Amino acid sequence: MSIFNRLFTWGKSEAHAVMDKLEDPIKVAEQGIRDLRQDLSNSMQSLGQVKAQVIKAKRDLQHSKETAADYEQKAMLLLGKAQNGEMDVADAERLATEALGRRDGAIERGTVQMRELEKLNAMTGQMENNIQALRSNISKWENELKTLRARSQVSRATRKLNEQMAQVDPSGTISMLERMREKVATEESLAEAYGELARMDHSVDDEINAALSGGGRTSASLEDLKARMGVGGALPAPGEPARLPGK
């Protein structure tokens, strides 16, 4: 049964590990920041393109202004020549009219270019604000991610330790240790009991050997005591009154 418990526990831990990898908020946040950095790079490229359009629009507008001023100056010179008699008045007025027409065309183009430039400037300002906000947020989120990564490592280590301390023993290790403890206690008790039996057997053997080795002889001290007491032969049995001399 224990092998099935271990397999079940292993499978459950593997499933949890897979879910942790799939739902790891740190990895999700890291990927999100990488995506934001890619968005920032794309926005910077777009901003560069818009700024290039702004530069071109400014040049076109300046060219239109210069063209309008040039044609107006030419029309004035033509009229001045006609007034000075340097050329025919009709030809001068006709050419001056053409010059003024081209001046007006340049002015109209300049007006359109001015509106386009204003739009591009507004777009550039908005993009710069968005990029600045995005860059600031990325920096802030990266700092928060560092803190969260450190906190996550500490919390995971703490959770693992708490799980190890609080988890139920699925492999039966604790129960096995309990059985071993009981077995050792039983063996110790048996060893102590057999030791007492051995000591008892040894004491009996010692008494028997002592009796046999003595050969029924009494010591000199005992004989002397018996002589002084006037006691001859064997001592009275326990409970029997001793016979005094002359009795």
Image (cartoon, grey):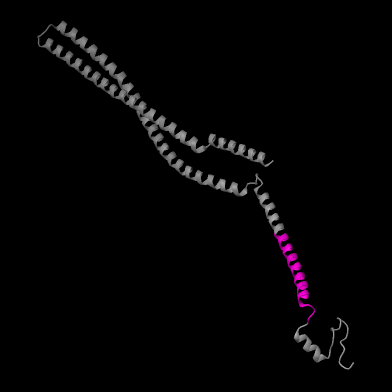
Count numbered badges in the picture. Answer: 0
Question: Where does the image place residue 86, in percent across and percent down from the top left?
Answer: 9, 9
Residue found at the very far front of the displayed protein = 215
In the figure, residue 223 lies in which quadrant? bottom right
Q: Picture coordinates of residue 161 (x, y %)?
A: 56, 48
| Magenta part of the chain | 188-217
In front of the other: 220 or 27: 220
User: If the image is split into quadrants, where does the N terminus sit?
Assistant: top right
Q: Is residue 97 above or below residue 194?
A: above
**Considering only vertical position in the picture, is 83 above or below 231?**
above
Q: Position of residue 15 (x, y in %)?
A: 59, 36
Residue 181, given in percent of the width and then of the height, sits at 68, 55
Q: Is residue 151 above or below residue 40?
A: below
- The residue under the point 14% across, 7% down is 89
Q: Nearer the viewer, residue 45 or 221?
A: 221
Above-or-below relation of 185 to 108: below
Instruction: Please identify the residue farthest to the bottom as the structure is shown.
Output: 246
Rendered image quadrant of residue 36: top left
Reply yes or no: does residue 33 show up in magenta.
no
